[in-house]
Image (tube, rainbow, N blue to C red):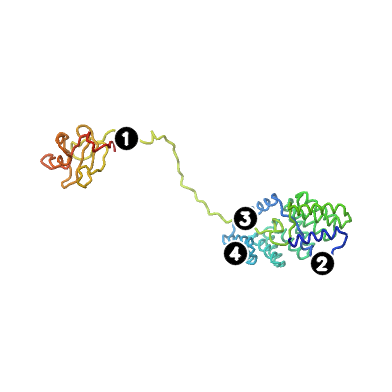
Amino acid sequence: MRVGNALAYTEGFRGFAGFDRPAALETDLGKKNMRVRGGAAGLLFVIAAIAGAQAHFNADAVRLNNRGVALMGQQFTEKAEQSFSDAFKKDPKMAQAAVNDGIALMTLQKLDEAKKALKDGIALDPKSAQAWYNLGLAQHANNELDAALGSFQQAVKIDPRDADSFYFEGVCYREMKQFDKAIESLKQALAINPLHASSEFAMARALQAKGEKEEAKEHFKLFQHMTSTKISAAIGLAYGEQGHYSTVTPVEEPQARQRAMIPVKLVAETMGRAIPPMPQKRVMDGAPGSLETGGACMLDVTGNGQMDLVLMESGEQAIRVLHRGGGGTSDIPGSACQKAPTASSCARRGRVGGRRTNTTPISIRAPTFGLRGRG
């Protein structure tokens, strides 16, 4: 059981068993008030309020602040406090860094330094409910009841839906023995959050002090039920156990400026229109009298280990083969090689105009080729 919880139960049993509590316990409980964490609505309010205050801060300061937030989560409080302090020095306009520093200092029980840091944050952002709330916590822990009451009232003005601020306002009134005002503030807290266990406990104490013991017992029973069934938690002094406003908050890192993109216009068009029709035939560029041709490929037709160029044509020379060799190539009429027993023999005797050719025509029915196409 946590210290805060143990003190709460001790106080409850002492008060309702009919015997007085020691003065030392009164002082101790005055500094160890309990309350549940704020509801989702309160948490969203905090995020929205802080996000609205995130202006243009120094990038290094932002990184230092957010590093401190991570360190607080890992319970490296001293390192976190140093990181917050460095962030505020780097950018003295960052109110959140000052508030976070105050929270870390308060966790380290350095109350005077915490109050100074929190006041620095308030000077930069007077509408920060989080800053006023934590200043109230530091003042209350230092037994400065009037100052703490004023700070919690400021937090209530800024965030009228925060049950925790109303709770501590009621606690201050009760410790100042203004029980009617205490009860009114605690009613406000319970109206906002009916499951605020700490408000039920504080209400029981205020009613008991007024002499209304039966009603006080009812509120104490509600407190016991909430905490024993874990519907709501009574919290102590540890970091993260004093409500959503008592935890440090990161600052959004500045985003890199996005430059305008090159304007691009996209046009939808069907494939039939986008791709021009392929010509049925084409004329080979070259010597006069060249033949119309379709596709072409490289094959070792003669089996001599060298690649030959195979042209897909029409007519008598449906397929032509150009052999590699010295002297280049020339076209040869299909009739000149129709009786050639093999492609190689045709290549050996093929001549045009007294010049030897490396061109061999092959019948379209030759089983060597099954490939057809247009290029």
294 on left or right of 98: left
The answer to whether the residue labelled 1 contacts the one labelled 2, judged by CB atoms less than 8 Å apart, is no
Crowd band around label 4 with a 10 angstrom C-alpha radius: few (<14), some (14–19), many (20+): some
> In 3D space, how far apart are the residues under numbered discs 3 and 4 (Cα atoms)?
16 Å
Q: Amino acid at mark 4?
A: Lys
Label annotation for residue 24: 2
Do the CB atoms of the residues marked 3 and 1 lie less than 8 Å apart?
no
- Residue contact between numbered discs 2 and 3, judged by CB atoms under 8 Å: no
Q: Nearer the viewer, residue 19 or 189?
A: 19
Q: Nearer the viewer, residue 59 or 209?
A: 209
> In this image, 187 relative to 334: left or right?
right
Q: Which mark is residue 54?
A: 3
Q: Which residue is mark 4?
A: 90
Q: Earlier in the sequence, mark 2 or mark 3?
A: 2
Q: Which residue is mark 1?
A: 278
Q: Amino acid at mark 1?
A: Met
321 in relation to 217, above or below: above
Q: Nearer the viewer, mark 3 or mark 1?
A: 1
Residue 154 at x, y = what percent? 75, 56
* SS state under label 4: helix
Label tally? 4
